[in-house]
Image: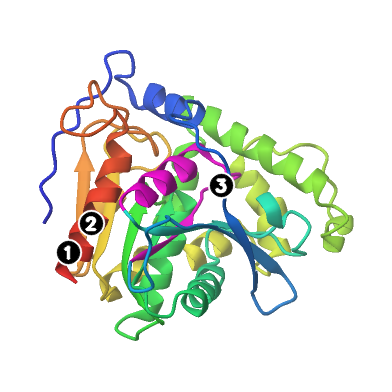
Amino acid sequence: MMDVPPFIPHPMLRSGHMQTIAGAYIKGHSRPYRATQHRVDVGDGDRLVLHDDCPDNWQPQDRVALLLHGVSGCHGSPYMVRVAGKLNDVGIRVFRMDMRGCGAGAKLAQHPGHAGRSEDAQASALKVHELCPEAPLTVIGFSMGGNISLKLAGELGDQPLANLDSVIAVAPPIDLVVCGNNIDEGWNQIYSRNFSRRLVRFLHDRREQMPRLADIPLHPTPKGIVEFDNRFTAPLSGFRDVTDYYTQSSAIPRLNEIALPTLILAAEDDPVVPVEMFRRADLSPSIELLITKYGGHVAHIAKSKGSDPDRWWMDWRVVNWLRTQSAGC
C-alpha cells in the first residue's frame, strides 16, 4: 500500500461535473511530439499504432508502460500526454496505444474499437515485449481503456503474458450495463450526448475503411452513447445488441481472477462511472482500490500541488504507484 496524500479539489472545481469537464479540456504542460510509431497487427486484418516515448537514459531492463485511452480519445488526449511525459521524466518508457481506427491508425481498421477489446491490448503488450524483451511492463488504462486493462488481467488469471507484471485502471467502467443506465440520467446525459456526437463524426470519417457501415444508416443521429452502441458498436462488432455487448465486455465478473498487482483509482463524485460498482465487486487480493470523495472522471485536479510537483493529483498517483511497484520488483 503506497502512501497517498489526501485529495482536496481545486476551489473552483468542487463538483464531479466541474472536475470532469476541466479534466477533459485543460491540457496541462504541453510537450512536443517526439514518439516513434510502431504498427500492431491484431490478427483480423486490422492494425493499431503505438507511440513510443523513450527517455534518453532508458536502459533495456528498465520499466515500460502501455497506455490505453478512453472513448473517442487517442494518443494525443491530454491525460495520455501528461502521464506519458511524467513517466518519461522518472525513466519509464511509454507506449501510447491508438485503439482501432483512432489517431494515427485512422485508416488501418475495418472494425471499431470497443470496451471489450482486450485482445488488442494483449497484441500490443506482445509487441512491446518484442521491442523491449527485458523490460517489465505495466498496462495503464483510462476510463474505457481501464475496463480493457482489467478485463485482460482477469482473462489471464495466473497465466503469464510476456513481461506484463502489473495493471493500473483509472475510472474504469467495470459494469457497462450500470454505466449505460447511469450516463443516460439527469445531467449525466451531457456526457452521453457528447460521446455519441464524437463517435458519429468518427463513423462519418471512417466510412471508406468500414464497408459494413453501408448497411447501417447514420440518421437519425443517436441521442446518447447507449443508443449509439446499440445501433453501431454492437452489430459492427458481432454482438446481438447493446446488452450483449455490455455484458460480454464488462470487466467486473473477472476481477476476482486477477493475479497481477493492480491499482484501481476512482472518485465517489464521478458522473460517468458510479462508484458503487467497485464496492460490490468481488475483488481479488491483488487489487488495491483507491477511492476518493471528489475527483470527477479522469480528472482529480487538486487545490494545491502539496507534495506533488503540480496540481494533477491523478497523474502522480499513477507515477508513484508505478515507482513503488518497480522498487518492489
Q: Is residue 89 located in the magenta-colored stretch of the structure?
A: yes
Above or below: residue 328 compared with residue 184: below
Residue behind mark 2: 323
What's the distance in space between the residues labelled 3 and 2, CA to CA?
27 Å
Q: Which mark is residue 327?
A: 1
Q: Which residues are magenta?
A: 63-90
What's the distance in space between the residues labelled 3 and 1, CA to CA?
32 Å
Q: Secondary structure at mark 1?
A: helix
Q: Residue at x 60, y 38 (%)?
A: 195
**Looking at the picture, how far across and down is residue 298, in whole percent?**
39, 39
Residue 316, quarter of picture = top left
Q: Is residue 72 located in the magenta-colored stretch of the structure?
A: yes
Residue behind mark 3: 71
Mark 3: few/some/many CA within 10 Å (<14, 14-19, 20+):
some
CB under 8 Å between discs 3 and 2: no
Circle 3 or circle 2, nearest the eye: 2
**Looking at the picture, how far across and down is residue 186, in whole percent?**
47, 26
Above or below: residue 83 compared with residue 270: below
CB under 8 Å between discs 3 and 1: no
Is residue 186 toward the left or the right of residue 138 in the image? right
Q: Secondary structure at mark 3?
A: loop
Q: Quadrant of the N terminus?
A: bottom left
Residue type at the position of mark 2: Arg
